[in-house]
Image (cartoon, helix red, strand yellow):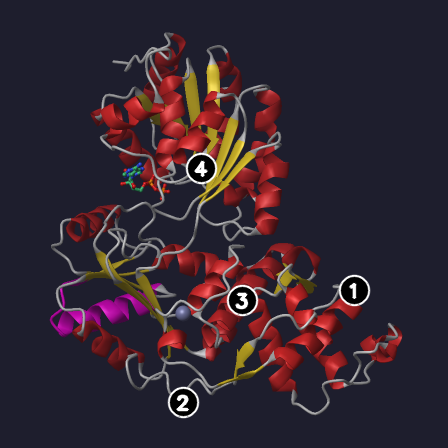
Amino acid sequence: TALDIPPQVSSPEQVLAQVFGYREFRPGQREVIQTALDGHDSLVIMPTGGGKSVCYQIPALLLPGLTLVVSPLISLMKDQVDSLVESGVAADYINSTRSREQVLDIFSRIRRGELKLLYVSPERLLAGTFLERVRESQVSFVAVDEAHCISQWGHDFRPDYAALGRLRACLPGVPMMALTATADKATRHDIVQRLQLQHPFEQVSSFDRPNIRYTVAEKLQPMQQLKRFLSLQKGNSGIIYCGSRRNVERVADALLVAGYKAAAYHAGLEQDTRASVQERFLCDELDIVVATVAFGMGINKSNVRFVVHYDLPKSIESYYQEVGRAGRDGLESEALLLFDPADEGRVRSLLSSGSTNEEQLRVELHKLHSVAEFAAGITCRRQVLLNYFDEPSHKPCGNCDICLNPPTRFDGLEAAQKVLSCVYRLKQGFGVGHTVEVLMGTRNQAIAERGHDKLSTFAIGQRFSHDYWYSVTRQLIHLGFLSQDITRGSALSLNAAARTVLKGEQALELAEPRLIANSRLKGKTP
Ligand code: ADP
Ligand code: ZN
C-alpha cells in the first residue's frame, strides 16, 4: 500500500503533518529537504535526536520512484521501518537478518514500483548484483546515515562504508544526502570526498544542549560517588556507561543489591534479554540501565534525566553522543563523568593490543587523548565541546562544574600571546610538545635540527614551568583559539579568533591549573 502523494499537490509541510504528525520543522530540516527535492547533494550534521530521519524520509515520499537509505545499524532498521509502515509509508529493509524469500519479495515490489523507501546495510548494498537490480527501477534519492563511518578520521570507521564511494558511479545524477551526528572538520571533508558529493549543501545544526549540566569528578571511590549521585536522582531515568562488560555487571549488581530498579545491558547478553531491558526502560519499569556503548543507539526515550560515565569514553564524539541521550525533552538533566587519569593508560593499552591497523590506532589514540584532556581540563565544559565540534563559543556557559565551581583565574593575555606567536613562528606545523619545548628554550635535537632555537619565541617562556605552558596551550585549544589538526600529526594551527589576542585587542583570563583532587568533589558536585 504505497502512500501515493502526487508531488504537485503535496508540500513537505503537509507530509510532516499528515505522515509524521508534527506541526513545524526543526531548524535546518526544511532547507535540507528542499535541497534533495531540487536534486542536489547535501551533508547534514545534526546532534543525536536532532531529527535527521525526516530529512530524508520526506523527500523520499515526495520524489517519484525509490529512495535508498544506507545504514550500518541493523538493529534499528526494523524499528524504523515498522514505524514508517505504521504511518502508512511503503518501506522495507534488506540486511543479513532477511531471508532469501523476503529479499526476492522486496525486489518484486520494487519492480512493480510499490516501494518508496528501502533501508539497506552497506554490505548488502555493495554485494553481488544488488545495485544493478535496483537500477532497473527508478532510484531517485540516496541517503547515507551515520556517514562518519566512511571516514578514518571519524570515531567509528567501518571498511564496508569506505566502499560506498562506488555509489556515485553506479547511480550517476541521483542526489545524495550524507547524515551524521558527529563530524569534525577532517571527517566532514572526508565524507564529501569519499561519497563524491557534488557541491553539497552543508547543514550544521547547533550542538549545544543547554539543559544538560556537565560535571567531571575525579574517580576516587566510584561506587560510593555513584550512589551519592543517584541518591539525588530518586525515581529518575538514567543510563550508566561502563567501559567493560565486567564493570557493567559489577555496577548493575551493586545497584540491584542497593534496591535500585537497574539492569545490565551489553553485547554479551542474549538478544531477548537485551530487548527486554530496552523495553522495560522505555516504559519506565526500569529506572537505570548500566550499559556498554552498545546501548542507546537510536533509543527514543525523552525523559532520561542523567547519564553517568563510570569509565572514560573513547572519544569526545562518543562522550557527546552518549550524554546526548539525556534531556531530549528539554528539561534539566545531568551528565556526570567519573575521571581517573589512569583510565587513559588502561584504554590505551587495550586499544594498542587489539589493533592491526597502525593508522587507525593513531587516530583512536588521538581521540582518546582529547577526551582525557577534556576531562582533566579547567575550561568551561560546554565551550570545550562546542569548540571541538567547530561551533565557536567564547562565553562560559554557567551550567557545568567549571562554571559553577570556578578555578582561580589570572590575566592570561601575555602568556597566550607567547604561545600563539610561537605557533605562528613554527609555521603551524608542530604539536603541543614541541611548541612548549621551544617556549621553554629546550635545546634538543628536534629543535636544533630545524633551527628553532633561532626563532624569536625561543625561550621566551623560561620563567614558567613546563606544566604551566602545557596548561596555557591546552586552554587555548579548549577555548577555540588553537586547533589541533589530526590529519597533520596533531599540529597546532591558529584559528581566526587568535588574531585579536595576538594584537592585544581583547582581554583574556585563563585558569590556574588545579589538582583535580582539590575542590571538585566538595560542594555541589558529587
Ligand atoms: P536523529 O536521527 O537525528 O537522532 P530522529 O530522526 O530519530 O533523530 O528524531 C528524534 C526525534 O525527534 C524523533 O522522535 C522524531 O520523530 C522527532 N522529530 C523529528 N522532527 C521533528 C519535528 N519537526 N517536530 C517534532 N519532532 C520531531
Ligand atoms: Zn560552563
Q: In this view, does 58 lie above or below 445?
A: above
Q: How far apart are marks 4 and 1 (CA)?
A: 38 Å
The residue to which callout 1 is attached is 427
Does residue 33 show up? yes
Q: Quadrant of the N terminus?
A: top left
Tag 1 or tag 3, which sits nearer the N-term? 3
Is mark 2 in CB contact (under 8 Å) with mark 1? Answer: no
> Which mark identifies residue 370?
3
Q: Looking at mark 1, is its residue's CB closer than 8 Å to ligand 2?
A: no
Disc 3/disc 1 C-alpha distance (Å): 23 Å
Q: Which residue is drawn at 56% across and 33% down?
A: 164
Q: What's under tag 3, amino acid-wise?
A: Ser
For ligand 1, the image quadrant comes to: top left
Which residue corresponds to mark 2? 518
Give the extent of the magenta segment: 245-262
Residue 453 is situated, as x and y percent measured from the top left of the image, at 85, 80
Q: Which amino acid does label 4 sit on?
A: Asp
Q: What residue type is labelled 1?
A: Lys
The disc labelled 2 sits on which kind of residue?
Asn
Q: Residues within 10 Å of mark 4 (few under 14, many from 20)?
A: many
Which residue is painted at 59% across and 31% down in the image?
A: 197
Residue closer to the observer: 178 or 243: 178
Mark 4 / mark 1, whichever is N-terminal: 4
Q: Is residue 198 magenta?
A: no
**Spot occupied by residue 353 in the image (x, y as percentages of width and height):** 55, 65
Q: Which of marks 3 and 2 is nearer the N terminus?
A: 3
Structural distance between the alpha carbons of marks 3 and 2: 22 Å
Rendered location of residue 315, percent (x, y): 48, 61
